[in-house]
Image: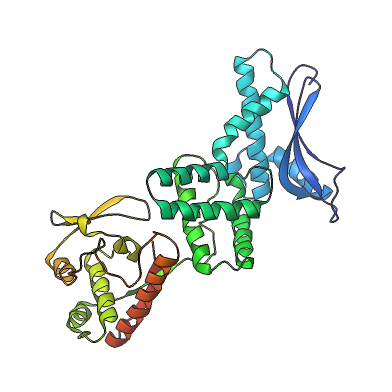
Amino acid sequence: MENGKPLIVLSIDTLKRSVDETYPLIIEVMHYDKKRRLDTYYQVSEKEFVRLVKSVLLYTQKGDVHDAMLRYLLDEIIAIQYAITFLNSYVTDFTVADILKLYRLNQKPFLFIPYLKGIIQEYKKEGRKAKARLCSSLLQQTIAFHHSKRPLYFIQMDKKWLEAFRKYLLKLEISTQMIDSYWLILQEIYANASSEGLCAKFINPFKENAFPTLSELKCEFTISDIDNLFGLDLSENPELAMARDICLFKHFADDMTFMDMIFIKRDDVYQDNIWFRRNKDNRLCLVDNNETLKRIIDKFTFTGVYLFPLPFERKQEYGNYFFKELRWYNGELKKIAKLLNVPIKKVPCL
């Protein structure tokens, strides 16, 4: 520091000892006898602090680190060092305040809450009001759970954080359907952020995640089973007949997922093709509108916007309406499987 070289120091605030004998973990940046501190969201004991310091000295690449706290600290240190290196290259004299200012500018894209706010604004501009409302609800719950003035980085959202968030939502007596809706949104956000390079270098918490995800049921039909399904007389049970037609449509449309199928509009069927955007990755796809599919589609003579007249109103892509429809379809499909005596299995709904 005497030679004008900035120092990054990992420390604990010994003046703020907690009841469990842990201390706030802080990072101090020193330059020209001035120092500024960066608070972290961690509390550690003196023993844990010694272990952390040794680990920080050992590891130079975050990709080799599986401990969330250590990954976070290494990420912070690298970001501060980047700011120092940048200032050294272009400025002859700078202060510790300049270091932290550049550090915060560089860190902003990696913050979860501003990123989610930006997504909400995009949905509003696109007129996707239901999706924007769901994301706004997720934002409010995330802020309430985080309950801190400190920023929330993507890197903090590891498996433990997500498990704690789910428990928090369950304590609020939020329905499991809504929690699953939040989960689908979080997965989508993480995938988008990864594609933009904002969290691709971190370990994806969703790969190791043990949360229940919504599934749809699928019958394992043989060719004779399909013939029998076509021949079933379900005229006295219109809902079961509708589920049968949906099942056949999905089968002959290259096993299209239920979620992709229910949002196909009548205008999406043209030029002997059925066009749709796959919810999994938003990719534009098409299915050949063959004679079998035409035969199924022609059964529905209603003039609604969507291709299939499901018993629930479709007001949003995620949330209670989608889950009601999927539960209804799974229930009817079990009845069909029982009628035909065919095996049934669970598959992802996306």
Measured along the vertical axis of the image, is residue 16 above or below residue 327? Answer: above
Of 129 and 230, the residue lying toward us? 129
Q: Quadrant of residue 91?
A: top right
Q: Quadrant of residue 141?
A: bottom right
Q: Position of residue 76 (x, y in %)?
A: 65, 37
Q: Position of residue 87 (x, y in %)?
A: 63, 20
Rendered residue at 43%/43% (across/down): 122
Q: Is residue 199 left or right of residue 32?
A: left
Q: Is residue 252 left or right of residue 272?
A: right
Q: Quadrant of residue 9?
A: top right
Q: Is residue 158 visible?
A: no
Quarter holding the N terminus is top right
Q: Is residue 119 visible?
A: yes
Residue furthest top as drawn: 92
Rendered residue at 48%/56% (across/down): 134
Measured along the vertical axis of the image, is residue 83 above or below residue 298? Answer: above
Q: Is residue 281 left or right of residue 120?
A: left
Question: Which scheme is used to colour this image of the protein?
Answer: rainbow
Numbered-mark total: 0
Residue furthest front as drawn: 303
Q: Position of residue 81 (x, y in %)?
A: 65, 29
Of 74 and 111, the residue lying toward us? 111
Rendered residue at 30%/76% (across/down): 220
Quarter holding the C terminus is bottom left
Q: Position of residue 174 (x, y in %)?
A: 57, 66
Q: Is residue 33 left or right of residue 334?
A: right
